[in-house]
Amino acid sequence: MAVTSPRSGRLPWGRIAGWAVLVVVMIVTLFPFYWMLRTSFSSTRSLAAGATDLLPVDFTLGAYRRVLGLSSTAEAVAEGGSSGTVSFWLFLRNSIVVATVTTAGQVFFSAMAAYAFARMRWPGRDAVFMLFLTALMVPPIFTTLPNFILIKDLGLLNTYLGIVLPHLLMTPFAVFFLRQFFLGVNASLEEAARIDGAGHVRIFFRIILPVNKAPIATLAILTYITSWNDYFWPLLVGKDESVRVLTVALGIFRSQTPQGSPDWAGLMAATLFAALPMIILFTMLGRRVIDSIGYTGVK
Amino acid sequence: MTSDTVHAAPRRTEAASRGAPPRRRGRRLGDLPIALAFVLPAALGFVLFYLWPTLRAFYLSLTQYNVLTPPRFIGLDNYERLLGDHLFWNALVVTAEYVVINIGVQTVMSVLLAVLMHRLTRSMFVRGVVLLPFLVANVVVALVWFWMLDYQLGIVNQGLEWLGVDRLAFFGESELAIPTIALVNTWRHVGYTALLIFAGLQMIPSSVYEAAAIDGAGEWRIFWRVTLPLLRPVMALVMVLTVIGSFQVFDTVAVTTGGGPINATRVIYYYIYDLAFTRFHFGYAAALSSVLFVLLAGVAYLQLRLSRAGESDLKGS
């Protein structure tokens, strides 16, 4: 609508209106993050009195101390927290373990398969690949129920392995995505290596992986984010505190906070704590993450 | 080896889309032994966590199963029961309402946003900001908005009061809960969707725009006559992805309303979860997820047919 003004007079009104819309969108996007920050440094007891204050109400680090298990019960209750103790450090560790192992395994094993599909000749190759692809059509919930039963039967409930296993060895998307890039590797590179006596293992590690650094990094970033943010599967198989990841911990923290007067500051401190690693990752890798969205779009 | 490379990833694929490089020893088995070794881990993952559970889920949908005792085959009873289950129909209606609001608002806003970015700026900062909500978890987004929309202390209701409007129980009132959840998730996804569309816009050659400008077309006309038609194949794919994703709403419901008030937000995913993991009706839950499976496949097929996704208007010109 905004950029649509048909003719430009003296001032480029269309552009100004367009920018106005963009700025509004950016404010609406960023404000909740600011509000999370502002609330997390407030005292829950005082929030009611200063509900519209733009700065933290009664500035305190108490919410973070509560969430990270550093404050005594009396201290926590005084600021409107609950008397139970939690330590989000533990959940942070669990999230890091789960996301890292999932990403490393999935990208590596999917790359191996993608290499076999893209650069080797063997009977049945295309049929097997098509079969892999059909799995893209299956909605996750459909396989989740039997997968839960399998993990339970294997005795892997409430273990790291149980949480990571379903996505550790492949996802159809990862294989498909990497194969597209491996297909494009210049065959002469491979031929040269083969003349030098290199086998497939060597070619895979020395040529295919290095040459495809960019798409592999893209896939790894996307996988890490997806894994970090996943809630449904870890909720089913990893509720136990020893393996509980941040998203599940947030849900439980929220359900434990008293209904009448929730510990908003504590909840926002926990929420920000859970979101922060992704925000840091994003500021470090900004451009690459943004480009990766374009990559997946044209898949 | 030809048809499955249609939606090839960008740039470098044309060189070798014919597949594997020719090998000298052209025996029938080719690289079979080493290929099997390379495919083995992924194949194991595929069979254990995709193929086998898919077949098993269909089978379970024909059984009565509470996880503790072995499944008992009961034929199509679960499906028959579905037809008379008002919670199932309720879940369908609620989910449909969610999808319509979510996708409707999200599509319009993301096209607008993508076009604005395309015409105004190449700034990575702007793109980064709009993408930010997508990078944090659904659970995080749900909780922030749960706080901001709180009836007593939420900043939004404070604002409404300041404007002299009555406060709203966004998550607490039956008619408001689904639109609220739909819009919260729109907030998370709109930037991501806009960037997908933006990538599509960048594939439209600038000569097209120059030609339109020479013809004296204004921005409004260019948008309707040039941009939108040329964007159709990308939009079709984006729509399929977002609609299918939208049907699977769960996280936001689980941490905010828990299906309430009185089933008003008991979406299909949540209902399946509830049946399986709090009531242990695994067979019945599997039947429900089979229906969802068929439903989603149908939706995707219809969308692709309707939008003729495979064709691009660019090829003719």
Image (cartoon, rainbow, N blue to C red):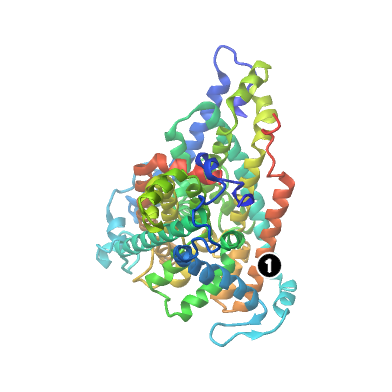
Q: Secondary structure at mark 1?
A: helix
> Which quarter of the rendered picture does the N terminus of chain A lie within?
top right
Q: Is residue A68 above or below residue B118?
A: below
Q: How many marks?
A: 1
Residue A182 visible in the shown view: yes
* Outermost top residue: A10
- Position in image of residue A252 (x %, y %): 42, 66
Nearer to the camera, A42 or B65 = B65
The reply, left or right, for residue B213 in relation to residue A237 is: right
* Outermost bottom residue: B69
The reply, left or right, for residue A51 in relation to residue B217 is: left
Nearer to the camera, B117 or A192 = A192
The reply, left or right, for residue B33 in relation to residue B308 is: left
Q: What amino acid is at disc 1?
A: Val
Residue B9 visible in the shown view: no
Q: Which residue is mark 1?
A: B291
- Position in image of residue B240 (x %, y %): 64, 50
Neighbours of disc 1 within 10 Å: few (<14), some (14-19), many (20+): some
- Position in image of residue B222 (x %, y %): 66, 26
Place residue A262 in its image quadrant: bottom left
The structure residue drawn at horizontal position 72% and vertical position 75%, both measured from the top left corner, is B79
Place residue A54 in its image quadrant: top left
The structure residue drawn at horizontal position 56% and vertical position 88%, both measured from the top left corner, is B69
The structure residue drawn at horizontal position 62% and vertical position 78%, both measured from the top left corner, is B60
- Position in image of residue B159 (x %, y %): 50, 42
Mark 1, chain letter?
Answer: B
Q: Is residue B211 above or below residue A224?
A: above
Nearer to the camera, A152 or B275 = A152
Q: Is residue B167 above or below residue A66?
A: above
